[in-house]
Image (spheres, coloured by chain):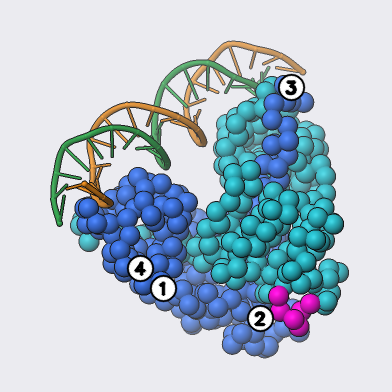
Chain colours: A cyan, B blue, C green, D orange
DNA sequence: TGATGTGAAGCGGTTCACAGCG
DNA sequence: CGCTGTGAACCGCTTCACATCA
């Protein structure tokens, strides 16, 4: 099976499947059909089989999939066979919340460095990680071998921080600042914007209330 | 122009355009072409024109769009002409971070109620909002006229909380718990899962390193 | 028998290319 | 002349339907 082009939505779903499968694993379920799995993660069975078939065939006809095997397979595909070293830039409200988020180490992500500019935060240790001054970013990132970064700075600084991160060798960035980051194409960036999500929900609310407007403006 | 079916990705982009346009407004820019706007938010000019054309025609040929008019138009489309009352369930790390997040009120979302089960948090006021016991959810939600809710509870409680929310009349839910919420189709749900985003990034990192694997498993 | 794996069909979103208009 | 608005072409993801095989 050749390594094909995988769409972003497929990758998202693979993560979704994995999340559900781990849940099943905790419940000691050891075999599952694409149909049951579909119900658990809000997909369709055909979609699941198609997604998996992009990488190989992992099921047994007439029976279904082995939960533990499929977990291992998906972890392999997603690159979760290793632990990832994460740096956090910006130790404000969101940043601190992430530092204390137990699911990160539990799922293979170790926050090994944190940066901020505010003098009163420097040197303090939050959830076992010392907060370093932003000037030392390049140095610490290289020294500790950081692979993934989370940006939780104000929007004004995000682009600049991002540039410094990838110049220091970070190739994946999760951005919580509400700005579009422009980046070289060999750097992977995803942005999470809470307000944007809320706005999307509100569109649906107001759209329902006006089901058949004739002229828009 | 009839009210058409708008895809989720279009709605997301409209929010994206709006974010960039507000930025432009702050810089006193008053007219912009689809092309320049495209550069600012990582889209294509054709995409922007197509998206907008679903709702009407708002530009001037040969000139571009009026920034302030387009902001107003998009706010109208997205239902942001009003302020929304938000309830927060779960005042842990993420919940507290959201309570203190200034962009919410700034962008039209007022957190008017917060709930938790932990006795030591009850009655305390976080960022101007009193934390109420979870039992009072229905009562407070109805009393205050809450329209939108944010779930930031542990995953085990999320589904139950969600059900109670929509039974109390909440029609839009932003969910930070890493579980698939099943909901009636007249309730809008979006889930933000930080670990899932990180996993997606890691796929790209490892996929780059193995550009042409011949046999997958 | 029952569920997988997968070509083929269907569909919806994106891009193209240009007519239309200020 | 420049940029919008938009039908038409294109492309890729999703769904269907069934041959396949444990």
- Alpha-carbon span between mark 4 and mark 3: 54 Å
First to last magenta residue range: A117-122
**Position of A23 compared to B100: left or right?**
right
Q: Which mark is residue B29?
A: 4
* C-beta proximity under 8 Å, tags 2 and 4: no
Camera-side mark, 4 or 3: 4
Q: Position of residue A174 (x, y in %)?
A: 65, 56
Residue at 32% from the left image edge and 55% from the top image edge = B33
Q: Are marks 3 and 2 on the same chain?
A: yes
Instruction: Please say whether residue A193 is visible from this viewpoint.
Output: yes
Camera-side mark, 1 or 3: 1
> Which residue bears the numbered disc 1?
B26
Label 2 marks a residue whose chain is B
Q: Which mark is residue B133?
A: 2
In front here: C13 or B42? B42
> Which residue bears the numbered disc 3?
B215
């Amino acid at each position: 099976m050749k390594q094909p082009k995988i769409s972003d939505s497929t990758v998202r779903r693979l993560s979704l499947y994995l999340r559900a499968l781990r849940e099943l694993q905790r419940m000691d379920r050891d075999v599952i059909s694409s149909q049951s799995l579909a119900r658990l993660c809000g997909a369709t069975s055909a979609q699941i089989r198609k997604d998996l078939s992009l990488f190989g065939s992992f099921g047994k006809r007439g029976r279904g999939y082995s939960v533990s095997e499929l977990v291992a397979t998906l972890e392999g595909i997603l690159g979760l066979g290793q632990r990832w070293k994460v740096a956090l830039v910006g130790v404000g409200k969101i940043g601190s919340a992430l530092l204390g988020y137990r699911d990160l180490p539990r799922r293979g992500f170790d926050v090994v460095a944190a940066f901020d500019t505010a003098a009163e935060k420097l040197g303090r240790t939050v959830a076992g990680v010392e907060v370093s001054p932003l000037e030392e970013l390049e140095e610490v990132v290289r020294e500790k071998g950081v692979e993934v970064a989370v940006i939780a700075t104000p929007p004004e600084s995000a682009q600049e921080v991002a540039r410094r991160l990838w110049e220091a060798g970070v190739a994946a960035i999760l951005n919580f600042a509400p700005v579009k980051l422009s980046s070289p194409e060999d750097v992977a960036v995803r942005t999470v914007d809470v307000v944007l999500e809320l706005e999307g929900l509100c569109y649906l609310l107001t759209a329902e209330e006006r089901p058949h407007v004739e002229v828009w403006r």
